[in-house]
Image (cartoon, rainbow, N blue to C red):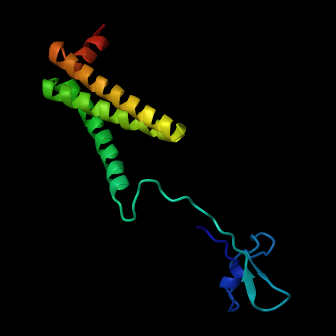
Amino acid sequence: MAAIVRLSSVFRRGVKPLFYQGTLLARPLVVPHNYQEQPHQLTARIHASQALNAGSGSKAASLHWTGERVVSILLLALGPAAYFSPCPAVDYSLAAALTLHGHWGIGQVLTDYVHGDAKIKMTNAGLFVLSTVTFAGLCYFNYNDVGLCKAIALLWSK
């Protein structure tokens, strides 16, 4: 939390900062009470809600964030790999990484915009089904057709 400090309170020993003018500075959050020398701070309480489903000392959110970044970097690396050496390993890796990246991204949108316990459970179940069908479809396409890498190359060649 940021605090505004009056420069005259910092430089009390006669040292004045360059270009010091009282009208240009913000007023401090400390005011004297009844013309006494002892100032009283004006404070406000800020209430924040506790994090849901996170215990103290839990590293789950940090690991999830790290996992999202790893998958994003993996997708960046799979692009050139898919172009220069299209093979089944790259096809299946691309299918898994794209599905996982999409699942986490849509999950964040649902977390932000869906409220209510029943609605959250329904949308999470729908997202799980959508992600499962997407991954199964991509794997089916990789196994029974040309694969993702060659399919994208065919789209660009026409």
Q: Based on the displayed image, in which of its 4 quarters is residue 144 positioned?
A: top left
Q: How many marks?
A: 0
Considering every residue shown, the one lying at the far top of the view is 158
Residue at position x 30%, y 23% from top?
Answer: 133
Where 40 falls versus 151 (above or below)? below
9 is higher (above) or lower (below) than 2 = below
Location of residue 153 in the rendering, given as x and y in whole percent from the top left corner = 25, 16
Is the residue 120 above or below the residue 34 in the image?
above
Residue shown at 29%/45% (left/top)?
70
**Lateral position of residue 142 relative to residue 15, left or right:** left
The image shows residue 37 at horizontal and vertical percentages of 78, 92
Q: Residue furthest right?
A: 34
Q: Is residue 34 left or right of residue 134?
A: right
Q: Which quadrant would the C terminus be assigned to in this image? A: top left
The image position of residue 135, as x and y in percent, is 27, 26
Q: Which residue is painted at 15% across and 18% down in the image?
A: 143
Q: Is residue 99 above or below residue 66?
A: above
**Along the line of sight, the residue nearer the viewer: 144 or 114:** 114
Q: Is residue 108 left or right of residue 140?
A: right
Expressed as whole percent of the image width and height from the top left, the position of residue 32 reads 80, 84
